[in-house]
Amino acid sequence: MVFECFGDKKKVVIAMAHIGALPGAPLYDADGGLDKLIEGVLADVEKLQAGGVDAIMFGNENDRPYVFKGSPASIAAMSAIVQAVKPHLKVPFGVNYLWDPVATVAIGAVTGASFVREIFTGLFASDMGLWEPNCAEAARLRHDLKRDDMKMLFNINAEFAHSLDQRPIELRAKSAVFSSIADAILVSGPITGQPADQSHLKKVAETVKDVPIFANTGVNIDNIRDIFSVASGVVIGTHFKVDGNTWNAVEQARVSRFMDVVNAIR
């Protein structure tokens, strides 16, 4: 079992529901407002659920350029959007506010999320500058909000960034579980939509036995068999979009074809 919220599934597919740009972001559509954002993400959620995914994770991938600390307006907006879509959900859900672990935990806690994902540990040189997340603050907030049941999924190697930690990725993963109480470890590629290095995924899975291991980027219908030979789960976004383009809407047929393969594997 991966997590209790997923039932007895041994291989889990978490699908991304990318919310449009939030208030304050350069790409925000002020004329459409929150109503348009809710309409767009709800349409994607319905297609993902119809295609048979196991869980959904709401993310603010459209808030480019990304920030390390979310604004009150955008955090409030994302919370409101998730809450508006929540009555339509038939599967467990999680949230990820890029790239703010404290905001992520806060949104997840108040909306009733089963899990959250972020970069919680490490030190990175990134497109956004020097990246130094505060895991202790995020974990203590989860506890203070009485949401210790909400799983924290640690993305161990950040997209758009290079780790300044010289330890091998498997040792960083093992350390995150030991020192920072990670509930799961996620292994990513260098950028959204690009696969994680299979050797990294394998090394982490061989080293970290206490928690589930997920592939976090670049998962598709052609590599899912290899990934599931190593990992307990995947997070998938780009492959489910029209033409496999991260910024497009979800295409239900792509979801269904992928889940047909997954169901044949597990």
Image (cartoon, rainbow, N blue to C red):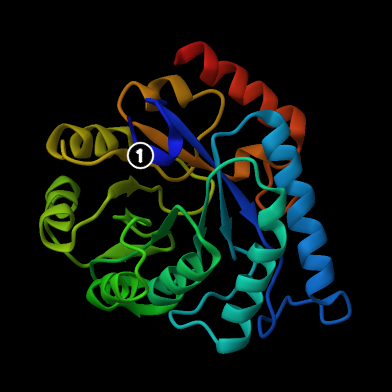
Q: Tell me the quadrant of the picture where the N terminus can be found.
A: top left
Q: Is residue 135 above or below residue 179?
A: below
Viewer-proximal residue, 88 or 68? 88
Q: Is residue 74 above or below residue 198?
A: below
- Relative to 146, is 217 on the left or the right? right
**Percent coordinates x, y for residue 74 in the rendering:** 61, 80
Q: Is residue 196 visible?
A: no
Q: Residue at x 39, y 27 (%)?
A: 227
- Relative to 137, is 242 on the left or the right? right
Q: Which residue lies most toward the right here?
A: 31
Q: Tell me the quadrant of the picture where the C terminus can be found.
A: top left
Q: Is residue 228 visible?
A: yes
Look at label 1 and name its amino acid: Phe
Res 241 quadrant in image: top right
Which element carries disc 1, helix, strand or loop?
Answer: loop
Q: Residue at x 55, y 65 (%)?
A: 111
User: Label 1: which residue?
Assistant: 3
**Percent coordinates x, y for residue 136 in the rendering:** 22, 74
- The number of numbered discs placed on residues in the rendered structure image is 1
Q: Which residue lies most toward the top here?
A: 264
Q: Residue at x 41, y 58 (%)?
A: 117
- Relative to 224, is 44 on the left or the right? right
Res 212 quadrant in image: top left
Q: Is residue 53 above or below residue 68?
A: above
**Percent coordinates x, y for residue 50 in the rendering:** 73, 32
Viewer-proximal residue, 223 or 212? 212
Viewer-proximal residue, 88 or 158? 88
Neighbour tally class for label 1: few under 14, some 14-19, many 20 plus, Cα within 10 Å: some
**Percent coordinates x, y for residue 78 in the rendering:** 62, 71
